[in-house]
């Protein structure tokens, strides 16, 4: 009251003279107990002179008057202002919140007053306001004109920020406005809940609930097996489920259950990732035998079908099957053709008709001094460089080709001395006599050393004016069957075998010249070969309790124990042996049998050659300058059949025989074969047959 009185003190004026006391009126404002934080605004307005501006003032409730008799109140004095009439309107408005906050007006009362002539009227008038504020927050209940939507809760009024707690905290727009209290259950965790039912709550009931648009779309399956794979908006998979919840299972995918890859019993099914329809079984894999390990399967073999995880059979390759000779590592469909008398690239043509580039083909040597029914050739040998080439046979037949492009010259017993029709040189008269020659060897000077039936020997230098040196072994001997020679320190040493199974050493020009090395009763030696005199391999047959082939070795003229054979011996003897290198050798014998040796004391019998004719001779190819040459360690073999063949035994089995051309000349037994360091071949047989590769 004091404040308002002071505020309105300017109303004090003198009506007629300054001796008069200023007129005034006391106003009592009564309100409800507990209203401590509001505001009363008092406005005074001259009712007569309404153009005069009103005077205002504010006063706040007093908490110390809550318990005064008659209830709490505040008093305001209104004094007459100079120039004003004594007719005054007093308006009191009640506001929420302290006066400085300018809170909402919740109630108002007006009273017209007539001020006394002078002095303050003794009769105060009272204004009564219903201002309950149960929670003492300065805001009145809404039904009392206030803004408090919960007058018993101090945390609910327009000054509070709305929180989600099931209350209208800010008393605006209802309970928990601005908060999404709709929780939808997503039981399968796929991001799309079931609906339209939901739980209304400030917090989710558990971590499987989520906010979601009330309009959906909702999950078509929210629980159970595979539920997480089925929801609107999902990409449709091939998995027998309605992934995108469009009521169509596996739409846009081809049919399942259709036969596919029938060779392995497949049918169409959904792929593991569900992105496609695939065959339940992989396509069948067709494997072909690859005996020679060159990566190209046998072109004539039947394919072996493998399905799924069936393991690969050793020695087979997938799909590739262009190998025309699967036991020959020198032939396959992707090979380049080279000069070797073999169809290397499997195009059906040997050496691709490049006879000129290769120097010739494998064919019969047409020459006056080698042909004819009375020329039964038994042995052929070449010099270390490949020439000269000496051939010898029955009835003292002997001829030499000195160079690659020359014709054979005859030193044969009984050949005529006239001029040959093919421009060959006339036969020479310095023959080695009428002996059936069976074995030969040529030294580094081109001299041939001959051995024949009855242990007879001869040496011919090839000089047309020099006599042939002839003689005979001075030790017991029979028909000679094998010969190999060595030149060391100017001394020539030759080892021979005979038909009685002896091994004989011939030191040319030595004293004694002839030494009987082996004449055992339980081993017959028929073939001998070696790369040096320090180590020899001897093949033959057992003459003791065992029957069949036998082998032994000589190291510095000292014999080994008999080598073992695997798996078993066959009938007959091992007629010839050849060392290709220090740990590789081949031997051949009667009944189409052959053996390989790998440096130990065991000889392994090759698989069946497909023939029972007796093999007569063998050589082994070894190219020391090219260790990767696929022809290395291949054994070239000839036989005594009526239609003799040139066969090859590779490390993988029997390759196809090489064609001897013309075919009508390959119709006699073949007796011997020789090979040069470069792979040139010489083959001799009955009725004047001499085959050569490469022959122009």
Image (tube, rainbow, N blue to C red):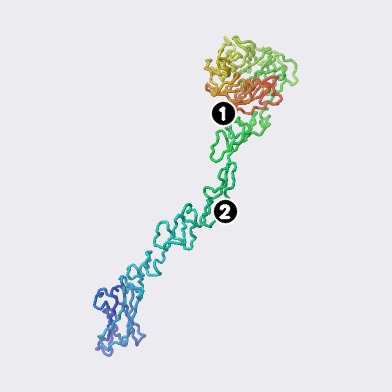
Against 285, is 616 above or below? above
The C terminus - image quarter:
top right
Q: Residue at the location (48% across, 54% down)?
A: 227
Is 97 in front, or is 614?
Answer: 614
Q: Position of residue 608 (x, y in %)?
A: 60, 25
Residue 120 visible within the image: no
**Which callout, 2 or 1, points at the residue further toward the start of the chain?**
2
Which circle, 2 or 1, is nearer the viewer? 2
Horizontal arrangement in the rendering, residue 399 relative to residue 196 (left or right): right
SS for callout 2: loop
Quarter-of-image position of residue 633: top right
The quadrant of the rendering that contains the N terminus is bottom left
Is residue 286 depicted above or below 687 in this figure?
A: below
Q: Position of residue 546 (x, y in %)?
A: 56, 17
Q: How many marks?
A: 2
* Nearer to us in this view, 642 or 376: 642
Q: Mark 2 touching mark 1, by CB under 8 A? A: no
Which dot marks residue 252?
2
Q: Residue 255, can we see it?
A: yes
Answer above or below: position of 505 versus 251. above
């Amino acid at each position: 009251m004091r404040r308002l009185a002071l505020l309105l003190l300017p109303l004090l004026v003198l009506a007629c003279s300054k001796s008069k006391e200023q007129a005034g009126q006391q106003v009592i404002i009564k309100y409800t107990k507990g209203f401590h934080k509001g505001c009363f605004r008092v406005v005074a307005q001259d009712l007569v002179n309404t153009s005069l501006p009103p005077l205002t003032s504010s006063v706040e409730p007093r908490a110390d008057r809550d318990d005064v008799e008659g209830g709490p109140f505040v008093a305001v004095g209104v004094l007459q202002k100079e120039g004003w009439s004594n007719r005054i309107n007093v308006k009191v408005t009640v506001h929420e919140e302290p006066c400085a906050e300018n809170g909402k007006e919740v109630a108002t009362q007006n009273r017209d007053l007539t001020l006394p002539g002078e002095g303050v009227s003794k009769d105060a008038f009272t204004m009564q306001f219903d201002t309950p504020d149960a929670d003492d927050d300065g805001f009145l209940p809404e039904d009392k004109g206030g803004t408090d939507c919960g007058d018993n809760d101090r945390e609910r009024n327009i000054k509070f920020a709305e929180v989600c707690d099931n209350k209208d905290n800010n008393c605006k727009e209802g309970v928990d406005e601005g908060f999404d209290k709709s929780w939808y259950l997503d039981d399968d965790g796929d991001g799309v809940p079931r609906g339209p039912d939901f739980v209304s709550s400030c917090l989710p009931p558990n971590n499987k609930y989520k906010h979601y648009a009330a309009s959906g779309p909702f999950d078509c399956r929210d629980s159970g097996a595979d539920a997480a794979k089925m929801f609107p908006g999902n990409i449709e998979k091939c998995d027998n489920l309605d992934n995108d919840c469009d009521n169509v299972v596996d739409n846009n995918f081809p049919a399942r259950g259709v036969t596919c890859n029938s060779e392995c019993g497949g049918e169409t099914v959904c792929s593991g990732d569900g992105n496609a329809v695939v065959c339940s079984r992989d396509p069948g894999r067709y494997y072909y035998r690859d005996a020679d390990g060159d990566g190209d399967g046998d072109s004539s073999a039947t394919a072996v079908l493998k399905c799924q995880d069936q393991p690969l059979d050793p020695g087979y390759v997938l799909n590739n099957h262009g190998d025309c000779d699967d036991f020959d590592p020198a032939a396959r469909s992707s090979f380049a053709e080279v000069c070797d008398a073999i169809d290397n690239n499997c195009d059906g043509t040997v050496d691709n008709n490049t006879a000129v580039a290769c120097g010739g083909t494998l064919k019969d040597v047409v020459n006056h001094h080698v042909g004819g029914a009375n020329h039964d050739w038994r042995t052929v040998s070449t010099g270390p460089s490949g020439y000269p080439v000496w051939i010898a046979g029955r009835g003292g037949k002997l001829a030499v080709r000195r160079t690659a492009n020359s014709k054979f010259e005859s030193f044969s017993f009984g050949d005529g001395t006239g001029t040959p029709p093919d421009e060959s040189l006339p036969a020479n008269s310095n023959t080695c006599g009428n002996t059936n020659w069976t074995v030969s060897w040529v030294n580094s000077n081109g001299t041939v050393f001959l051995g024949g039936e009855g242990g007879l020997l001869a040496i011919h230098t090839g000089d047309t004016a020099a006599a042939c040196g002839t003689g005979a072994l001075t030790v017991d001997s029979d028909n000679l069957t094998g010969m190999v020679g060595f030149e060391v320190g100017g001394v020539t040493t030759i080892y021979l075998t005979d038909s009685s199974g002896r091994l004989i050493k011939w030191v040319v020009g030595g004293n004694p010249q002839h030494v009987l090395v082996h004449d055992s009763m339980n081993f017959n030696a028929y073939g001998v070969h070696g790369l040096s005199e320090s180590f020899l391999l001897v093949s033959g047959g057992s003459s003791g309790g065992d029957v069949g082939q036998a082998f032994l070795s000589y190291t510095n003229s000292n014999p080994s124990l008999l080598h073992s054979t695997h798996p078993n011996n066959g009938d007959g003897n091992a007629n010839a042996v050849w060392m290709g290198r220090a740990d590789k050798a081949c031997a051949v014998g009667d009944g189409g049998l052959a053996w390989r040796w790998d440096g130990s004391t065991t000889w392994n019998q090759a698989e069946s050659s497909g023939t029972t004719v007796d093999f007569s001779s063998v050589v082994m190819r070894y190219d020391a300058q090219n260790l990767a040459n696929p022809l290395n360690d291949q054994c070239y073999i000839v036989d005594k059949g009526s239609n003799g063949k040139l066969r090859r035994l590779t490390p993988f089995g029997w390759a196809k025989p090489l064609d001897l051309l013309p075919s009508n000349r390959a119709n006699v037994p073949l007796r011997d074969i020789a090979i040069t360091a470069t792979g040139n071949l010489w083959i001799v047989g009955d009725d004047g047959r001499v085959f050569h590769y490469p022959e122009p």
